Image (tube, grey):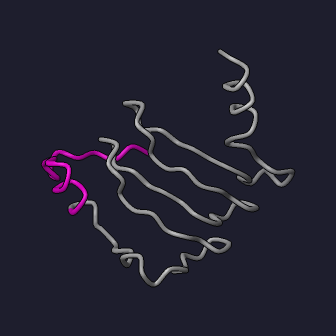
């Protein structure tokens, strides 16, 4: 592990003194692909966020203001809500074979 990796590990996925997520966070799918990245403030999503499918394809990106999704740029496409079935169909997965992990 090089010095930049050590610094990065010390600066992401941290909790504040109240035990809430705070600062820059990343999460990864079991296959190593990025799942999401963005910032928390006192446990709430805040600022620019990106979410990805398990195949690495961008699912959506948006802005949050203390946990509330907001639209700062009217030129950007509107965020659409997808059901689990929509996502499974996009990934070519048989929705009847899906099992959710807790």
Report whether 49 appears left or right of 92.
Answer: right
Residue visible at 44% across and 45% down? 35
Please give the range of residues in magenta.
Answer: 86-102
Q: Where is residue 80, by image quadrant?
A: bottom left
- The answer to whether 78 is drawn above or below residue 102 in the figure is below
Residue 88 in the magenta stretch? The answer is yes
12 left or right of 60? right
Q: Quadrant of the N terminus?
A: top right
Q: Quadrant of residue 90?
A: bottom left
Magenta-colored stretch includes residue 96: yes
Farthest front residue? 75
> Camera-side residue: 93 or 12?
12
Q: Position of residue 92 (x, y in %)?
A: 14, 48
Q: Which residue is the extreme one toward the top? A: 1
Q: Is residue 94 above or below residue 71?
A: above
Residue 69 coordinates in the image, percent (x, y): 54, 75
Q: Position of residue 88 (x, y in %)?
A: 21, 53
């Amino acid at each position: 592990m090089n010095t930049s990796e050590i610094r990065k590990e010390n600066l992401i996925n941290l909790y504040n003194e109240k035990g809430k997520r705070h600062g820059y966070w990343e999460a990864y799918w079991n296959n190593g692909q990025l799942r999401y990245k963005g910032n928390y403030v006192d446990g709430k999503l805040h600022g620019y966020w990106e979410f990805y499918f398990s195949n690495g394809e961008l699912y959506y990106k948006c802005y949050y203001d203390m946990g509330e999704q907001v639209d700062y740029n009217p030129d950007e496409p509107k965020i659409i809500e997808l059901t689990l079935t929509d996502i499974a169909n996009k990934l070519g997965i048989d929705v009847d074979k899906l099992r959710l992990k807790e």
